Image (cartoon, rainbow, N blue to C red):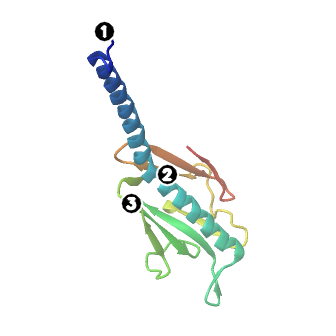
């Protein structure tokens, strides 16, 4: 007698294999989504650092006053773009950038928690090779990336 169709065991094996594949895809996707907030924050920070350095190098002015420099001041949950030789909370031109709530600056190894780019050259004012990094950590997964800057304001590595 000829049978058409599948045996119960064959169906169970196929369903089991599909369940394993779906599980692997779900785990992979969740890992990527967790890292997305960290990657997005780091990419935005790198772009803002480069923008501040470019403003310093090109001599972008505020009205008719040429600024002494441009910089970025770091706090654990945000960073602030500022104009001038140092960060001052009283400056109305400061631009605070609030980062994703799942991401924090866990280690800020910079003089006065800031990077200041010198006017014209774009070099980091008061560069210290021992204080030249910022670590960004995602709290729900403990993924972290550290940005290192050299004296010329170039991000030398992102781990």
Nearer mark to the viewer, of 2 and 1? 1
- In the depicted view, which residue is nearer to us: 29 or 54? 29
**CB contact under 8 Å: marks 3 and 1:** no
Q: Write down the quadrant of residue 84 in the picture.
A: bottom right
Q: Secondary structure at mark 2?
A: helix
Residue 97 locus on image (x, y percent) = 45, 68
3, 30: nearer the viewer: 3
Label 3 Cα neighbours within 10 Å, binned few <14 / some 14-19 / many ≥20: some
Report the residue that reaches farthest toward the front.
1
* Residue 109 visible in the displayed image: no
Q: Position of residue 105 (x, y in %)?
A: 43, 54
Does residue 105 lie above or below 92 as drawn?
above
Instruction: Report which residue position mark 1 lands on.
Output: 1
The mark lying in front, picked from 3 and 2, is 2
Q: List x then y, in percent, for residue 14.
A: 35, 24
Image quarter in which the C terminus is found: top right
Q: Residues within 10 Å of mark 2 (few under 14, many from 20)?
A: some
Count neighbours of disc 1 (C-alpha within 10 A) and say few if under 14, some if 14 to 19, many if 20 or more.
Answer: few
In the displayed structure, 43 sits above or below 85; it is above
Per the model, the C-alpha gap separating discs 2 and 1 is 62 Å
* Residue found farthest to the left: 8
Mark 3: secondary structure? loop
Query: For mark 2, what is the residue?
Result: 39
Q: Which residue is mark 3?
A: 77
Distance from Cα at disc 3 to Cα at disc 1: 73 Å
Q: Is residue 14 left or right of residue 143?
A: left
Task: Report the label total.
Answer: 3
């Amino acid at each position: 007698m000829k049978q058409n169709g599948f045996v119960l065991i064959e169906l169970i094996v196929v369903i089991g294999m599909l369940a394993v594949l779906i599980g692997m895809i779900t785990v992979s996707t969740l890992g990527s989504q967790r890292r997305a907030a960290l990657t997005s924050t780091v990419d935005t920070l790198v772009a803002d650092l480069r923008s501040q350095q470019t403003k310093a190098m090109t001599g972008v002015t505020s009205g008719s006053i040429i600024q002494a420099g441009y910089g970025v001041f770091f706090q654990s949950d945000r960073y602030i773009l500022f104009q001038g030789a140092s960060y001052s909370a009283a400056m109305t031109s400061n631009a605070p950038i609030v980062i994703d709530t799942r991401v924090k600056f866990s280690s800020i190894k910079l003089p006065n928690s800031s990077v200041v780019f010198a006017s014209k050259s774009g070099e980091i004012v008061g560069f210290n090779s021992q204080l030249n990094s910022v670590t960004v950590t995602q709290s729900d997964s403990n993924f972290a990336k550290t940005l290192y800057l050299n004296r010329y304001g170039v991000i030398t590595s992102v781990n």
